[in-house]
Amino acid sequence: TQLLEQSPQFLSIQEGENLTVYCNSSSVFSSLQWYRQEPGEGPVLLVTVVTGGEVKKLKRLTFQFGDARKDSSLHITAAQPGDTGLYLCAGVRGTSYGKLTFGQGTILTVHP
Amino acid sequence: KAGVTQTPRYLIKTRGQQVTLSCSPISGHRSVSWYQQTPGQGLQFLFEYFSETQRNKGNFPGRFSGRQFSNSRSEMNVSTLELGDSALYLCASSFGGDQPQHFGDGTRLSIL
């Protein structure tokens, strides 16, 4: 059983569409991070959310941390082919900052 | 600014052999964490080192070990390799505490 359930696992959309990726858990996390990974490379940090209810925006990407700090979402507006990649959510439990628990990942493909 | 450097990038071994992977963290970072990434299990935490001490350990057998040197560089060793050890091994570094982790591009290990 995954501690962090990420959905959907696969997403194939057309350029210009909006999408949301969800990351859910029954456990509380001190913080939650979102990464994007491209083939042959390591994950690249997009954002860290630490406060329940927090919303962070990064250009067309909006990240939200649930009030109870058990879930998070990533919303992309007007997706572009350059957004294609593997999106990963990862959480920190308690003060184990060096130990990230990852979701299974969402493979996003944006078609021109 | 140099990122996290992992060497080698690719490695091919046979069952029963052992292997050592290296990770040079971002300058100033004292925490180094290791992860295994496979298509079936996703990203799983192996262990974390901070100031040469193992601070957290994941659920991997004792064949997986690591160490950290005084300059924060870290090595990971896997003994008696099995086919199932084929994976992308990722290293991440941070300043420690609640600071985010930054990943290298990994070492792709293939076991024949």
Image (cartoon, rainbow, N blue to C red):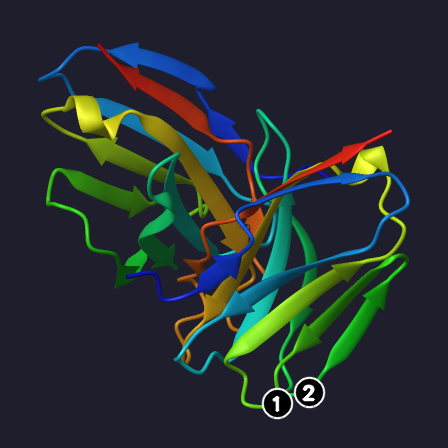
Residue A27: mark in rendering: none
In screen coordinates, is A18 left or right of B102? right
Q: Nearer the viewer, residue A37 or A5?
A: A5
The answer for how far apart the CA atoms under marks 2 and 1 are is 4 Å
Q: Nearer the viewer, residue A93 or B51?
A: A93
Is residue B19 shown to the viewer in this render? Answer: yes
Residue A53: mark in rendering: 2
Residue A67: mark in rendering: 1
State the residue at coordinates (45%, 36%): B23
Residue B26 in picture, x, y percent from top left: 60, 45
Name the image quarter holding the N terminus of chain B: top right
Name the image quarter holding the C terminus of chain B: top left
Q: Nearer the viewer, residue A80 or A8?
A: A8
In screen coordinates, is B107 left or right of A1? right
Residue A106 in picture, x, y percent from top left: 57, 47
In screen coordinates, is B13 left or right of B39? left
The quadrant where residue A63 appears: bottom right
State the residue at coordinates (68%, 37%): B2
Q: Secondary structure at mark 1?
A: loop
Mark 2 residue type: Gly
Mark 1 residue type: Asp
Residue B104 in picture, x, y percent from top left: 55, 37
